[in-house]
Amino acid sequence: GDSVTQMEGPVTLSEEAFLTINCTYTATGYPSLFWYVQYPGEGLQLLLKATKADDKGSNKGFEATYRKETTSFHLEKGSVQVSDSAVYFCALNEGGSYIPTFGRGTSLIVHP
Amino acid sequence: NAGVTQTPKFQVLKTGQSMTLQCAQDMNHEYMSWYRQDPGMGLRLIHYSVGAGITDQGEVPNGYNVSRSTTEDFPLRLLSAAPSQTSVYFCASKRANTEAFFGQGTRLTVV
């Protein structure tokens, strides 16, 4: 079946540091890929998405590129802020399916 | 648009009590689902529905019941609460091939 693997957290960075959160996936078809963010005390919300190979999703300074050859969708940001502290979930959705597959989430802590 | 609305936000139950967590969406989404989130466990799917009158079990359905009489509403019932059901519960809705929209969560404690 489908699966999503994210790097274990927490990831702890200083403000203005470069961020990478790794995400790899296993899927039978050609899924859409997503990153969600969960701020403390809130539900998940979409951060960015990509629907086909080589697409780059971007939002709020975050980027991720759909790499079919390495089955990866790594999240990057050039300069993190304290306000980026949250839990980040990588997810996929196979075409024609309603049910998404989520990774376990990676906690990011950014210190001033 | 309100999106996905969950009530209540917080609840404390005694072991053996029953209750219903409410979820409503105003986006006319076919798919609705319930997850629980526990430390170190990620999101685990409890039940889901692909339309009114259609429900199915997810990964951890035991102790929970659902129904979907309308497109908008998808309540989750705890039949006889147990301490192991202490968790944060999220409702989500979506269309096929698109992103999911989540509610703010219900924080449930069973004592």
Image (spheres, rainbow, N blue to C red):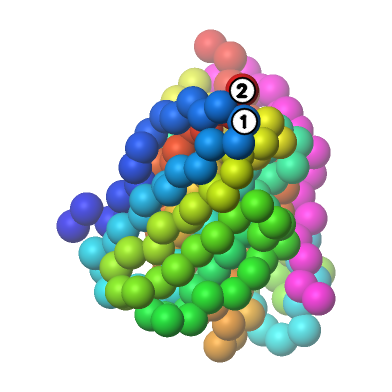
Per the image, label 2 sits on a secondary structure element best described as: loop
Q: Chain of mark 2?
A: B
| Magenta residues, start to end | A1-23
Along the line of sight, the residue nearer the viewer: B107 or B20: B20
* Quarter of the image with the N terminus of chain B in it: bottom left
Left or right: B41 as drawn, with respect to B55: right
Residue at coordinates 56% horizontally, 50% vertically from top-left?
A: B79
Q: In 3D space, how far apart are the residues under numbered discs 2 and 1 (Cα atoms)? A: 6 Å
Left or right: A87 as drawn, with respect to A24: left
**Where A3 sits versus B81, above or below?**
below
- Indicate the position of residue A39 as horizontal and vertical percent values: 47, 33
- Indicate the position of residue B26 as horizontal and vertical percent values: 24, 64
Residue B15 marker: 1
Residue B6 marker: none
**Where A36 sits versus A110, above or below?**
below
Q: Amino acid at mark 1?
A: Thr
Q: Amino acid at mark 2?
A: Val
**Where B24 sits versus A13, above or below?**
below
**Where B42 sits versus A24, above or below?**
above
Residue at coordinates 41% horizontally, 58% vertically from top-left?
A: B75
Along the line of sight, the residue nearer the viewer: B64 or B15: B15
Give the mark toward the camera: 2 or 1. 1
- The crowd level at tag 2 (other Cα within 10 Å; few <14, some 14-19, many 20+) is some
Residue at coordinates 63% horizontally, 80% vertically from top-left?
A: A94
